[in-house]
Amino acid sequence: MIEEKVLRTFTEKLGQVTIRGIEELGYSLALLVESAYWLVFGFHRRQAVKLPSIFEQMMHIGIQALPIVTILAFAIGMMLAIQGIATLKTFGAESQVVLGIALSVTREFSPLIIGILVAGRSGSALAARIGTMQIAQEIDALRVIGISPVRYLVTPAMVAMLIMLPSLTFFADLVALLGGGVYSSLELGMSLQAYADRTIEVLKVDDITQGLYKSLVFAVIITLVSFVNGFSVTAGSEGVGKATTRSVVMSITYIIIADMVFTFVLTH
Amino acid sequence: MTKQTDTQQDAAIEVEDLVTHYGSTKILNHVDMQVQTGEIMVIMGGSGSGKSTLLRYMLGLHKATSGSIKLLGHDITTISAKEMDKLRKNMGVSFQGGALFNSMTVGENVCLPLREHTHLDENTMQIMSRMKLSVVNLGGFEDLMPAQLSGGMIKRAALARAIVMDPKLLFFDEPSAGLDPVAAAELDDLILRIRKALNTTIVVVTHDLDSTFRIADRITVLDKGNILMIGTVDEVRNSDNERIQSLLNREARHVEINADEYLKELTGQKSD
């Protein structure tokens, strides 16, 4: 009797979670299509996407993140150099550390760290902002004024993310390589010039673009997850808190899973 | 010499046989009502009567289960998105909490509909928004942020934003909620003044009786998703309907309890 009840509750719960998941996926895709629609056809509907709001988002998402990105990327570069030199010492192949740093930074670490950082910094801010607007009826106000919330809020954020994430990733590439270079030159007595030459020698354009492509996918994930969670807030300020947490956790999870899938596809 | 009165008034808003659901719960049950051009219609009812829901459907924020809602002759349940955009330029809404955009100044808030829908130059837009702000007695406040305003000022600023495009239809959701009696009375006067100046059709959703009797031409009384009565202030006051009288006299609702239903409720069984 009790087992039956537990089983039933479990099945019901599983069903609810599945339905919510499918609903959210559908809603995300609809948002993606709609924001692209406004970008392309907004002008014809006399509701063009405004450049200033894109720039404003680019400031929040990209420019203001530069200090923290610099610190993180430099530390990651150093960390890879420390780890790489320590490991390669066992084989007496310390000089190969340059190859290791160059490839892991551009292909993996930069896009992933930037993705996680932006999800935590800007994804949460977006979800909280949209959630607060939702409970203050500001979203309704936009709609009754005749402004599509997607055109006004989602599209600018989406475009800003798509521009700033690859830019930040490329910037992080450079800073992380510098970080690795500084440690390597101190530890191995190799000049920074030699390190830079060797890096340029081993790096292929593909390695860098692979990281940039990933960051484009992460940009879409962060934007959609933040907005889906923000728009779905109903239960007051507690709901805003929950939506913010949920959007950060979900964004990071999806980013890491997408990264794994992406890496598998690109290396095969 | 007699002045000819306008006998052939058209309905600015026509709601016909409107049925709406929230999830699987029915909220509005075959609602029919009309609001004439230039009329102030107050929609009244207790909490959960469906009055706010009716407003949200009139604003086109949700899709109805069945029935039609005509605003200025356009059925918004079947209208295209483009037509709806056009229609919205003729509608102004003042939400319960004001719903001013917190990231913009008061002036920018009022300007927003102009900025999005017109091609006026910056100066003209500034002048128009200052004019509307002075209509609601907020002249000189355009550079403040909404967070710096009092509750009454926020509502008046929201009203300025709602009327900046000189709409033909104006909707208010609980205008007096959260205001002291003086501020509420000021807002009522504003509503009357705007109607007089612009001949705007106005729909007000409220449970404030004083305000209702001060501004209403006609009153729609809603109860549990049904229309109890539509009539003038006097007709509603003199109605012998028990529910209306208890609403007017602020009597507590007597909930009739069926013993079997109550037992089911307590034991958590679903009643059908």
Image (cartoon, rainbow, N blue to C red):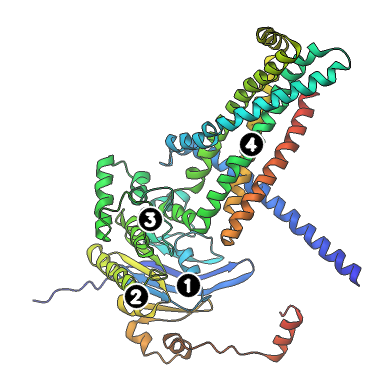
Question: Crowding near pointer 1: few (<14 within 10 Å), some, many (20+)?
Answer: many
Q: Return the residue nearer the eye: B21 or B49.
A: B49
Give how far across and how far down residue B246 sits, in percent: 46, 88
Please tell me which residue is depicted at 65% across the width and 50% down the height of the picture: A245
Instruction: Please determine if labels 2 and 3 lie on a single subunit.
Output: yes
| Residue type pointed to by label 1 | Lys
Instruction: Point out the tag, 1 or 2, that comes first from the N-terminus.
Output: 1
Residue, disc 1: B51
The disc placed on residue A117 is 4
Instruction: Point out the tag, 1 or 3, that comes first from the N-terminus.
Output: 1
Label 1 to label 4, Cα distance in Å? Answer: 45 Å
Inspect this view and state whether residue A203 appears. no
Label 1 to label 3, Cα distance in Å? Answer: 31 Å
Question: Crowding near pointer 3: few (<14 within 10 Å), some, many (20+)?
Answer: few
Q: Would you identify the image quadrant in which residue B118 lies? A: top left
Residue, disc 3: B148
Between label 1 and label 3, give the one nearer the viewer: 3
| Residue type pointed to by label 2 | Pro
